[in-house]
Image (cartoon, rainbow, N blue to C red):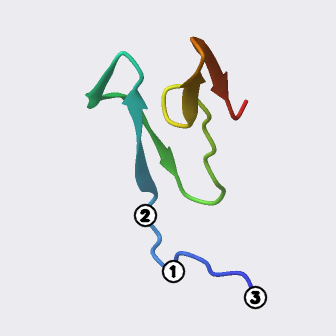
């Protein structure tokens, strides 16, 4: 079952700034679709001085 936004107006999606995680880099308006982003700053870890990420 797909859930849909019943509103006729688009949703504004904010995208985090990877250089300043407290800020927003930009935003996109989405009326019918989806937004996917990926970044090393969210999901990574350091083991023995080497950074590993999900990407």
Query: Image quarter for residue 1?
Result: bottom right
Image spot of residue 13 (x, y percent)? 43, 47
Task: Choose mark 3 or mark 2, whichever is in front.
Answer: 3
Q: In whole angstroms, how far apart are the C-alphas of marks 2 and 1?
A: 9 Å
Task: Name the residue at 63% across, 44% down.
Answer: 36
Q: 14 left or right of 43? A: left
Q: 47 left or right of 21? A: right
Which mark is first along the chain, 3 or 1?
Answer: 3
Are the residues at dot 3 and dot 2 in contact (C-beta closer than 8 Å)?
Answer: no
Image spot of residue 8 (x, y percent)? 47, 70
Q: 36 left or right of 6? A: right
Q: Residues within 10 Å of mark 2 (few under 14, many from 20)?
A: few
Closer to the camera in the image, 11 or 50? 50
Q: Secondary structure at mark 3?
A: loop
Closer to the camera in the image, 33 or 40? 40
Task: Name the residue at 55% across, 30% down.
Answer: 45
In the rendered image, the vertical position of residue 20 relative to residue 34, given as above or below: above
Residue where numbered disc 3 is placed: 1
Which mark is first along the chain, 2 or 3?
Answer: 3
Query: Image quarter for residue 7?
Result: bottom left
Residue where numbered disc 1 is placed: 6
Closer to the camera in the image, 29 or 21? 21
Q: Secondary structure at mark 1?
A: loop
Q: Residues within 10 Å of mark 3 (few under 14, many from 20)?
A: few
Q: Secondary structure at mark 2?
A: loop
């Amino acid at each position: 079952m797909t859930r849909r936004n019943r509103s006729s107006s688009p949703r504004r999606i904010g995208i985090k700034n990877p250089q300043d995680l407290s800020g927003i880099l930009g935003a996109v308006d989405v009326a019918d679709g989806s937004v996917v982003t990926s970044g090393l700053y969210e999901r990574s870890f350091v083991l023995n001085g080497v950074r590993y990420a999900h990407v």
